[in-house]
Image (cartoon, rainbow, N blue to C red):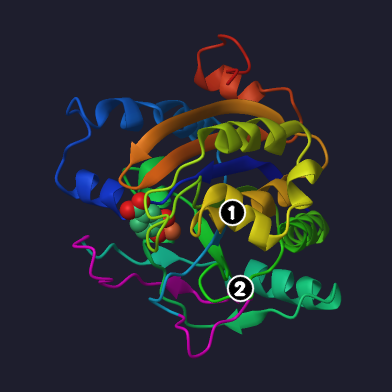
Amino acid sequence: MATIVGGVASSHVPAIGAAIARGLQQTPQWKPFFDAYGPAQDWLEAAKPDVAVVFYNDHGLNFFLDAMPTFAVGAASEYRNADEGWGLPVTAPFAGDPDLSWRLIEDLVEEEFDITSCQKMLVDHAFTVPMKLLWPDGPPVRVVPIHINTVQHPLPSPERCFRLGQAVGRALERYGDEDRRVVVIGTGGLSHQLDGSRAGFINRPFDKLCLEQIVDEPLSLTHYSVRELVALAGGQGVELLMWLAMRGAVGNRACRVHSHYQVPISNTAAGLLVIEPDCHGEAFALAQGGRGLFDRL
Ligand code: DHB
Ligand code: FE
C-alpha cells in the first residue's frame, strides 16, 4: 500500500521561475516569498516521499485548444519540459513512475473517470515552477503528473475535481505491489485574472477563506460552480481546482503544517499550503527540531 505523507499546494507563476533563474531569491523584493518555502522544503525532507503525484493545468505546451482533455494522467518513464516563451530555462527531465501511473489510470477508469492516458507528456511552468520551489536542488522523487483543464471551457466542476482527488487517494491506498511514500501536489491559484476587462483582479477575502476552509471543511468549497469560481477568484483563479483535487486525495481529515499568502506575485495572489493526513505533525516537528506542530494561518 502506498502511504500518502501529505499534500502541498502552491502557485506556479512563471515570474517565480525567472527570479530563480536570475538568482534573485535573497533580494528584498523576493526574499519573503522564497523564505516562506523553507518550512515546506524542511517538511518534505522529513516526510521523505518517493513519488509526487502532481495535479497541474497545462497552459498550451502539451495540450492546445484543438484537443483539450478534461483530465489527463501521465504514464511515461520521463517527462520533459520545453520553452513556452516565458524566458524560463528548460529544466532537466523528471523521472516518471509508469507502474504507479498505470495503476492510477486503471483505477480511475474503473471509477468512471474518463481520463486521457499520456505515454508522452511535456510538462509546463505549472509543473516545473512548484517542483523547483519545493526542491531547489532537483526533486528526489519520481512523478505522476495529472493535468486538469482550466483553459478551454467547459471546465470540470470543483466537486468533480475533489472527487478525482478522492479517487486518486483510494487508488494509492489500494496500490499494493510495492511500498511508496507519496506526496500529492496541487498547483495554481490563488485568485488572479490575466486578461480581459478584469485583468489584475485579486480577491483577498476569498483567498483567505479558501486557505482556511480547504483544510477543515473542503466540501464547502466544492459547492461553487465554475462560473461562481471565475466570478470570485478570476478567470485564472479557477486554478483552485488543482488545490481541491490535492485535498481530495489527502483524505477526510487533514491538518495544516504550514501556509503562506502573498499579494501580488506577478499578477497573482500567491498561496502555499502544506497539510498532513494524520494530524500528528511528526514530520514537521522533526523538521523543526521538535518545535511546535502546526503553523497557524
Ligand atoms: C501568471 C499566473 C499564472 O497562473 C500563470 O499560469 C501564468 C502567469 C502571472 O501571474 O503572471
Ligand atoms: Fe496558471
The local secondary structure at tag 1 comes to helix
Horizontal and vertical percent for residue 197?
Answer: 40, 59
Mark 2 or mark 1, which is nearer the start of the sequence?
2
Q: Nearer the viewer, residue 157 or 288?
A: 157
Q: Position of residue 128 (x, y in %)?
A: 38, 58
Q: Which segment did they paint magenta? A: 63-88
Q: Is mark 2 within 8 Å of ligand 2?
A: no
Tell me the CA gap for discs 1 and 2: 29 Å
Q: Quadrant of ligand 2?
A: bottom left
Q: Residue at x 79, y 51 (%)?
A: 223
Q: Which residue is mark 1?
A: 231
User: Overall secondary structure of the magenta stretch?
Assistant: loop
Q: Which residue is mark 2?
A: 73
Residue type indicated by callout 2:
Val
Q: Nearer the viewer, mark 1 or mark 2?
A: 1
On the image, the x and y values in percent for residue 96 come to 50, 67
Percent x, y of residue 115: 69, 79
